Amino acid sequence: AQKVTQAQTEISVVEKEDVTLDCVYETRDTTYYLFWYKQPPSGELVFLIRRNSFDEQNEISGRYSWNFQKSTSSFNFTITASQVVDSAVYFCALSDSSGNTGKLIFGQGTTLQVKP
Amino acid sequence: EPEVTQTPSHQVTQMGQEVILRCVPISNHLYFYWYRQILGQKVEFLVSFYNNEISEKSEIFDDQFSVERPDGSNFTLKIRSTKLEDSAMYFCASNLMRTYLNTEAFFGQGTRLTVV
């Protein structure tokens, strides 16, 4: 079955520290998509990145970077020089083709607290 | 930029009452979803809808739940007789396709349902 595991429930760092959020997934699909979403205290889901299974290039967007490794089924997210505004819950998600409907399977989320 | 719109943003209802959560998906999208997030937990798939019928539903989506697209624009989730455990954030999502080759998953801002 498709599954996403975010083993870190909560992480607390001090501003300007780098932090990595881990995501490990399980899937039998050869083609799949991975996502990261940010959920601030206001509750909405803010899309951060989509990555397909054929593209293992790491991606950098400003202070954010993502490391996709198919060999270890991981899609980790690093925030460099963290800021207080990065405090949020972060979800990793996987597209699930089992029902052929395009639904997403979410991990449990990691709560990141960045202290000033 | 196109967006998925949900109303209301917050609804409080008495146990046993019926509620209807409304969503306006992106206009040319074909696949529609409802997800639920109980406070402090992960986002869970409820149901997917395509071609005017349910294409997949989770175990959570029991007979108390129903969805419809009454007028070709709105996509609604109805809970017939709410229970305390239905209190959650409900997210609507829509996609043009059921894969994510060139697109993200578009989520609405959520409706926070509180059953008292």
Image (cartoon, coloured by chain):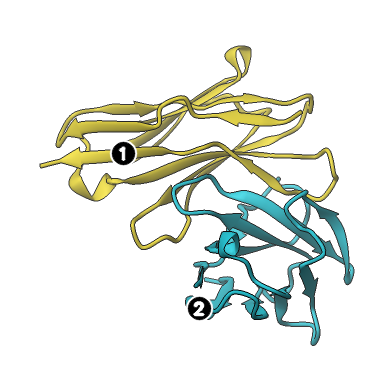
Chain colours: A yellow, B cyan
* Chain at tag 1: A
Using the image as rendered, state which of residue A101 and residue B38 is in the foreground: B38
Reading the image, the residue beneath label 2 is B11
Q: Residue at x 44, y 48 (%)?
A: B40
Using the image as rendered, state which of residue B88 and residue B75 is in the foreground: B88
Query: What amino acid is found at the position of numbered circle 2 in the picture?
Result: Gln
Does residue B25 appear to the left or right of A58 in the view shown?
right
Using the image as rendered, state which of residue B49 and residue A60 is in the foreground: B49
Report the label total. 2
Query: How far is mark 2 from mark 1, CA to CA?
Result: 28 Å
Q: Which residue reaches farthest bottom?
A: B71
Residue A79 position within the rendered picture, expressed as x and y whole percent measured from the top left: 31, 34
Residue A62 at least partly seen: yes
* Chain at tag 2: B
A110 vs B62: above or below: above
Residue B105 position within the rendered picture, expressed as x and y whole percent measured from the top left: 62, 54
Residue A79 at least partly seen: no
B101 vs B91: above or below: above
Q: Which residue reaches farthest top?
A: A71
Query: What amino acid is found at the position of numbered circle 1 in the picture?
Result: Leu
Residue A85 position within the rendered picture, expressed as x and y whole percent measured from the top left: 23, 50
SS class, disc 1? strand
SS class, disc 2? strand
For label 1, count other residues whose C-alpha is less than 10 Å away and answer few (under 14), some (14-19) or many (20+): many
Discs 2 and 1 carry the same chain letter: no
Using the image as rendered, state which of residue B58 and residue A74 is in the foreground: B58
Reading the image, the residue beneath label 1 is A112
Q: Residue at x 76, y 28 (%)?
A: A1
Identify the image quadrant of residue A22.
top left
Identify the image quadrant of residue A82.
top left
B108 vs A33: above or below: below
Q: Residue at x 60, y 31 (%)?
A: A4
